[in-house]
Amino acid sequence: MAQGMPPCLYPGDGIVYNVFRVGRMPAMNVRKPKFSRRSGRIVRLLAAVFFAMLFQRPANASLILGRHDWSPGTPEWQSDHGFAQLAPQPAGGNPAGWLEILFPATDGDPQTEMWDVAYTDASSLFAGGWETNMWVQTDFWSTNDLSPTVQVRWQSSKSSYVWAYEVSSGVGNGWRTLTAPLTRWSDWDILDPGGASEEAYLDDLANIDWIGVFIGRSGNEEQTYGLDDFSLMVPEPSQFLMLGAALAASGLSLRRRRS
């Protein structure tokens, strides 16, 4: 028995215990699991970037499903009405080959010879299924004294609707990149009477036949325009997978800290 320590007999057990006076126990420094401010900021930042990418303009993504760059072997493009002369050029584009679209000088009917559509088979650009998460992107050239109206146009093999999206109606200044997202059907005008609907748009897009660029020239003098890197684009899947993995890893880390 320890010196100076009074014994203590608990009733009913017949056993004598030594009681040690240890005084007041020191407070233990127990770290409470908590959600740190830094971790919270990281998760909020990752979430903000993730949702910003979901709603970003499509031109910011990077996966190319199909492209015509007018290098050797590029599929043929045609003039819809013959008012413009199309001539692939081997150099001088953005950066190499390009499609020259020449409107000769005219004093004819301004309702006809003032515009044309350069087009190609949609399947030559992309033979798979066209969907609303895609967009058309092209480099367009004009001199800085011209102000053409430029539209991306396409048509289905199943209807008479011609869908048009205006991408430029201002003064040109060399090469510039134009974008036409396929996301919202209401952003596209139809050129044939009868009205249209989202159902008709989706059905036509699933059966797209040709696609091209409408150019409304400015003035009767000879004018030259150009196309290069006419592309069909889609969001890059790896961007979303990487961000999703980062969010999942952050959540797992926080769960481990709490447990």
Image: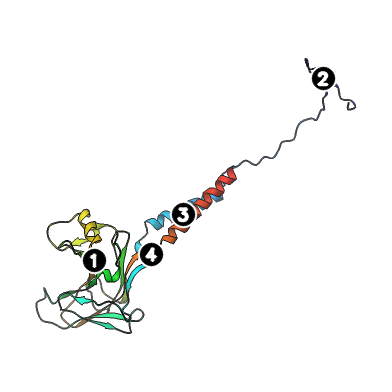
Instruction: Confirm whether residue 153 shows in the render.
Output: no
- From the image, which quarter does the C terminus lie in? top right
Mark 1 surroundings within 10 Å by alpha-carbon count, few (fewer than 14), some (14 through 19), many (20 or more): some
- Residue hosting label 4: 60
**Residue at the (58%, 43%) spot, across then down:** 258
- Residue hosting label 2: 15
Of callouts 1 and 4, the N-terminal one: 4
Image x and y of residue 44, in percent: 48, 51
**Please, is residue 206 above or below residue 215 in the view?**
above
Residue 233, image quadrant: bottom left
Task: Answer left or right for 7 relative to 62.
Answer: right
Mark 3 surroundings within 10 Å by alpha-carbon count, few (fewer than 14), some (14 through 19), many (20 or more): some
Helix, strand or loop at disc 2? Answer: loop
Task: Answer left or right for 192 relative to 239.
Answer: left
Q: Disc 3 and disc 1: Cα gap in Å?
A: 35 Å
Residue 99, image quadrant: bottom left
Please state which amino acid type lies under the numbered disc 4. Asn
- From the image, which quarter does the N terminus lie in? top right
Image x and y of residue 168, in percent: 26, 69
Q: State the residue in front, 35 or 205.
A: 205
**Residue at the (38%, 56%) spot, across then down:** 54
Q: State the residue in front, 34 or 206.
A: 206
Please state which amino acid type lies under the numbered disc 3. Gly
- Residue hosting label 1: 166
Please state which amino acid type lies under the numbered disc 2. Ile
Of callouts 2 and 1, the N-terminal one: 2
Task: Answer left or right for 70 relative to 36.
Answer: left
Please state which amino acid type lies under the numbered disc 1. Glu
Of callouts 2 and 3, the N-terminal one: 2
Mark 2 surroundings within 10 Å by alpha-carbon count, few (fewer than 14), some (14 through 19), many (20 or more): few
Mark toward the viewer: 2 or 1: 2
Q: Disc 2 and disc 4: Cα gap in Å?
A: 81 Å
